[in-house]
Amino acid sequence: MRIFNTETKRKEEFVPLEPGKVRMYVCGPTVYNFIHIGNARPMIVFDTVRRYMEYRGYEVNYVSNFTDVDDKIIAKANEEGVSAQEISERYIAECKKDMAGMNVKPATTHPLATQEIDGMIDMIQTLIDKGYAYNVNGTVYFRTRKFKDYGKLSHKNLDDLRAGNRSLLVTGEDQKEDPLDFVLWKPKKEGEPSWPSPWSDGRPGWHIECSVMSKKYLGEQIDIHAGGEDLIFPHHENEIAQSECCNGKIFSKYWMHNAFLNIDNRKMSKSLGNFFTVREISEKYDLQVLRFFMLNAHYRSPLNFSAELMESSKNALERIRNAVANLKYTEEHAQAEAMSEAEQQLAAGVPEYRKKFEEAMDDDFNTADALAAIFELVKFANSNVNESSSRAFAKLLRDEILQLMDVMGLIAEPKEELLDADIEKLIEERQAARKEKNFARADEIRNELLEKGITLLDTREGVKWKRA
Ligand code: AMP
Ligand code: ZN
């Protein structure tokens, strides 16, 4: 498996720190609003990387944070006259709904910055003790020039940066030793959430959050650190500086970055009026269409969002789903059980498609080519399966398509939605089973409903249910 590493600017063979295991950190969103379709790109792309690694047999420890303390969250809280916590909790819950809609698996851990302040204070203290950080009037800065490797990820030269950053000197940050130094801890302003620290009541800088959460949940060294390409500098560069100076070890082996999503060939922005949230898209499309659209491009290429491309993604996904539905129909109605000789010969060619799929994914996760391989398989199924096909042949092809689609996180066989009346009928059946002390059947019904996103609550007033 080869991964393009932003740091070395080339594709490298993936060799994990520990055989069979992958430690992966993906910078998550700042939660002050519904996530937009740009934020959805790293979620979908790196979820697919994770799924492919799992398919390849790795055990993946996947950590993705929520930044739940930030200027934008505070501004939104003030606007609404509620606490910052209320805002972040609300949008974390909404974000998780969107993730579920896009079939993005929950991370192994989703840490929250505000729950990890102690670890941040510890790391900042270590950096001060080692001479990499200093406190001026309650603000702690990182001494950038002291880290000799600074700029290794973004391939920036410190002196060029200095020239570009001169403006910082006149914006009230003249207490810094060097304009390149960045903030690790800042004192609170009136009305802001804050935590006590040895330097001031205040809050952490953004970069230190990820260094600390990554260390706590994955250890001092990780395999893959990922995010959108806007994070390369300064966020990831600063994370490297903090983590490597604190721990004395290389932080991450591979750095992966997705390119940006634009709308109608322009940068997505609120002021241009070309800004979509995932929620808005979900009103018009099944979010699986959005996922398909994202994976139909290489993650390192800029991607342009347009109604036209969404329509063609919708049609393409439908084509696959129709093929799968036809195969299922054949399976259920086939006259012959076992494959004919001719079918056996055809079946011998099926692994070729999987091989193509794997080759594409092994080459820096070329999801567009992987989808093309699935399409070839679909075409093969459409042209070789008919009413006289055997159950075994139809099943082979259906299973193959479903498995490959699942690696992409694409649902080729949508579950049928349960109607309210069906749910209530099952609940009645469960109550009857319990009365007869048939707890196995009662549990079976509960699990069946759970699988379809229905949770049951046994209350004093009887059984209540809700959809996920
Ligand atoms: P933020 O909430 O701005 O920190 O962004 C969360 C994640 O979304 C980061 O990995 C960003 O790089 C990524 N991101 C933000 N906007 C876009 C975009 N238009 N296209 C692709 N990725 C984006
Ligand atoms: Zn981060």
Image (cartoon, rainbow, N blue to C red):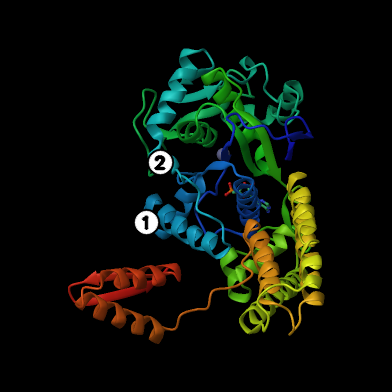
| Crowding near the residue tagged with mark 2, few <14, some 14–19, many ≥20 C-alpha atoms within 10 Å | some
Q: Which quadrant would the N terminus be assigned to in this image?
A: top right
Q: Earlier in the sequence, mark 2 or mark 1?
A: 1
Task: Estimate the x, y position of residue 307 in percent, counting from the top left.
Answer: 74, 71
Residue 461 located left or right of residue 279: left
Mark 2 and mark 1 residues within 8 Å of each other at the beta carbon: no
* Residue closest to the eye, 379 or 309: 379
Q: Residue at x 24, y 70 (%)?
A: 458
Q: Mark 1 highlights which residue? A: 82
| Crowding near the residue tagged with mark 1, few <14, some 14–19, many ≥20 C-alpha atoms within 10 Å | few
Hey, what amino acid is under mark 2? Answer: Thr
For the residues marked 2 and 1, what is the alpha-carbon distance in whole angstroms?
17 Å
* Residue closest to the eye, 84 or 30: 30
Task: Estimate the x, y position of residue 444 in percent, counting from the top left.
Answer: 35, 70
Residue 295 located left or right of residue 67: right
**Numbered disc in front, either 2 or 1:** 2
Residue 451, visible in the rendered structure: yes
Q: Residue at x 37, y 38 (%)?
A: 194
Q: Residue at x 73, y 31 (%)?
A: 7
Q: Mark 2 highlights which residue? A: 114
Q: Quadrant of residue 236?
A: top right
Residue 273, visible in the rendered structure: no
* Residue closest to the eye, 468 or 208: 468
- Residue placed farthest to the front in the image? 341
Q: Residue at x 26, y 76 (%)?
A: 463
Give the answer, above or below, for where 424 lies relative to 39. Answer: below
